Amino acid sequence: MKINDRLIALLPFWIVSSCYFLIPLIRSPIPAPQLFIDIDSSIPFTWWMIIPYYLYFISLLLPLLISDLSKLKAFVNIAVVLLLGSYSIFIIWPISCEPVLTSIKPNPLSILYRTVTFSWLQQNAFPSVHVIISGFIGFILAGEIPGLKYLFFIGVGLVFFATFLTKQHFIADSLAGLLLAMIGYRFWLKRVRIDS
């Protein structure tokens, strides 16, 4: 399949992914549950984990490696459902991430934090879209490119840990995101087997 066909097939996924930033414009944050705050207060801030946090943005391009059109379309369909489901929860329950954001301390990579922390985006998605999408993509590519599977699994793990160690998310967001990524992957496997 030509690269242009892949780009066109992925367009709905990229468009829906970008809609994440519209939600704070229509919904204000609400206080986070005290349990979330208590748990995450005991998790140390790890400033250098912002580097793997950015792997998510690279992962958005990785579906281009899926060369089979039916597999790519199955990815797009399931990814869009995962995103829309996450956005629905985000709109209903836009918990404030201010308690964890305030624990970010000045560090050598502060510029990378400023690039992903906006004054108008004080809520964080439950579940974590970073973890859902990077996990879903990583699981698919680990199966599609077995020679690089450990690289993809490491990437998934790094993004998972980065979301809460960089204080961009509560750990509960990340755990829920990982669970949904696994569920999405199971659905993708079933869909691909049916289409084969």
Image (cartoon, rainbow, N blue to C red):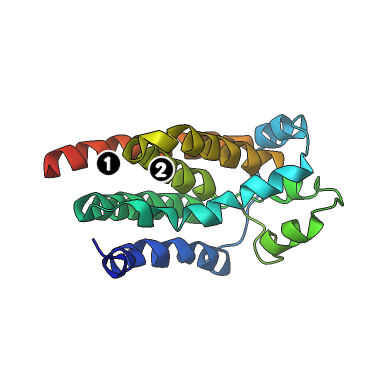
What residue is shown at x 37% (from left), y 61% (from top)? 13
Decide which of 152, 86 is in the foreground and name it: 152
**Image height check: is 107 above or below 165?**
below
Across and down, in percent, residue 47 comes to: 78, 44
Decide which of 40, 156 is in the foreground and name it: 156
* Residue 176: mark: none
| Left or right, residue 151 beside residue 183 | right
Which residue is most to the front?
A: 147
Decide which of 169, 186 is in the foreground and name it: 186
Do residues under tags 1 and 2 come within 8 Å of each other at their CB atoms? yes
Which residue is most to the right?
A: 106
Is residue 126 visible in the rendered image? The answer is no
Residue 39 quadrant:
top right
Q: Secondary structure at mark 2?
A: helix
Q: Secondary structure at mark 1?
A: helix
Q: Label 1, on which residue?
A: 188
- Which image quarter holds the N terminus? bottom left
Across and down, in percent, residue 99 comes to: 75, 46
| Circle 1 residues within 10 Å: few <14, some 14–19, many ≥20 | many
* Residue 136: mark: 2
| Circle 2 residues within 10 Å: few <14, some 14–19, many ≥20 | many
Looking at the picture, which amino acid does disc 2 mark?
Phe
What residue is shown at x 63% (from left), y 56% (from top)? 29
Is residue 191 visible in the rendered image? The answer is yes
Query: In the rendered structure, which disc, 1 or 2, sits on the residue that comes first in sequence?
Result: 2
- Label 1 vs label 2: CA separation? 9 Å
- Which image quarter holds the C terminus? top left
| Left or right, residue 66 beside residue 52 | left
Looking at the picture, which amino acid does disc 1 mark?
Trp
Across and down, in percent, residue 73 comes to: 24, 55
